[in-house]
Image (cartoon, rainbow, N blue to C red):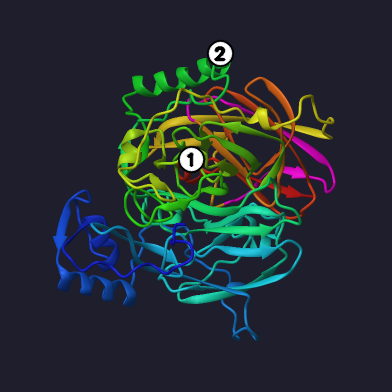
Amino acid sequence: MLQALTNPVIAVDFGTISLSAFDIESIFDVGIPDRSARMTFGRRTLLKLGAAAAAAGAVPGMVRAETPSAASSGSAPPQGNADHTIRIANGLAELASDHIVSTKLYNGRFPGPLLRLKEGQPVVVDIYNDTDTPEQLHWHGQTVGVDVDGAAEEGTPYIPAHGMRRISFTPGPSGLRFYHSHLTPGADLDNGQYSGQVGPVYIEPKREAGSHDREIFLVLKEFQPTLSRGGDMAADFLANPAPIEKLKQAGEDAIRASMAGGKPHGYEVGYTLFSINGRMLGHGEPIRVRQGERVLFHIVNGSATEIRSLAMPGHRFEVVALDGNPVPKPAEAPVLWLGTAERISAIVEMRIPGVWILGDLADDDRNRGMGVVIEYAGKRGKPKWVKPNPYRWDYTIFGKPGATSAPDETFEMMFAKDNAALNGFNRWTINGTAFSMDRMEPMLRLKQGKRYRLKMRNASDDVHPVHLHRHSFELTRIAGRTTSGIMKDVVMLGGYQEAEVDFVADNPGKTLFHCHQQLHMDFGFMALLDYV
């Protein structure tokens, strides 16, 4: 198995390594105009870098967390021992011997430690922030209260700089969840989920979905983000990608008007390094398996902005859970697709002996690290990659046919892009309004116990992985197909497409709804739901 989830970060190889100006700036808090420049450092300089990172850390330039709540500081240290302790600090992540990056980490490693919790059994967690800026730690996918959810928009107190918070909550629902930073860094690509602050959570179910011999956790993550113009990912990997013409016309009319006014395409984010469990393809230990073994992979897309795919030549994935929730109808797929923050639990029967690459379909991303070697017992040699046949990702194959019960109320949401409207960044709106971090006013008012439907319409060509905090929702319609029984907390809405999800207002308090693509949420794509 991969060791990154159970062992601390391996001591760096003190041979000559290459660090980017981005890394050096992060460690020393100095301004380097050309962040794409690369510098080479030997053993003595690297020792200084490690000492500087441990002693001081980076000071980010744009994190909207300037005023932590007084409730987060606390005047007296907590009594007794916590069940888990998480420390946020600057450190070095070794993706490969010649690729060591400086970033914020949980407990000095990437990914953060796997937390195995028990559904319904209260847990106490101490969170220390050893950096110079306040932080938020979000318990993604759990039905917790606003005081611990980890979203300032809902009122969660910040974890103060060089301070700590002790929190307690009852884990749930069961299955694969994760924890991550929840800030709005905007143009600061050192912070929020651009950093290494991602860790998996597994809440033990009373009964595991599917029969398997062992389980392996995989966290997918890119590093060294840079800004570029345009370059949106095609959405043709989704089932029934044909656009709704009315939505397409609205979106394209808006882009044409913007371009005619002299604006370029808005900024997007790209990456230079890719990893699974903090190691680039070909570095670190392979995943060792035996013929006939049934391996349950728990996969987390920990990216700030990217949609990821995974395939393994000759093998198929039996999907048993989406976002930690067992699916009504487990089904096989040759390729997995995960939007930002989505999780998939899938069983692979190891029936084709050899040495294979489990990796992303994108050649550039896979060749730059987004993959891991699968090695059968007794087999050696160069890992093989064979690209699978084209395959469209269809949520509905895992659901039940037919419609769900009618909701008590339906809210319609139109998502739109205002190209390059904010200093070159796209501004995103829901029903014509961009979220204000200053006002943080609720858009929708809910009544406890009622069932609500969100009818979402996407008037942009971007894929939006939309996320609802502190609740799970049922996918009821997507890309023209009706389904039921699929419970999720993130769903990919394709370009110029529609989707509908239902949820029950059973967890009172302000609830954040947003696109989980970091650039989108930072520049307007958020809304607050509140109970009355």
Q: Nearer the viewer, residue 385 or 129?
A: 385
Disc 2 residue crowd, few under 14, some 14–19, many 20+, Cα 10 Å:
few
454 is within the stretch colored magenta: yes
Disc 1 residue crowd, few under 14, some 14–19, many 20+, Cα 10 Å:
many
* Residue 346 image point, x, y percent: 59, 42
Distance CA(mark 1)–CA(mark 2): 23 Å
Q: Nearer the viewer, residue 253 or 324?
A: 324
* Residue 385 image point, x, y percent: 36, 35
Q: Which residue is mark 1?
A: 520
Range shown magenta: 439-462
Look at label 1 and name its amino acid.
His
Q: Is residue 221 visible?
A: yes
Label located before the other in sequence (1 or 2)? 2
Q: Which residue is mark 2?
A: 245
Q: Identify the element where label 2 is drawn.
A: helix
> Is 240 situated above or below 104?
above
Look at label 2 and name its amino acid.
Glu
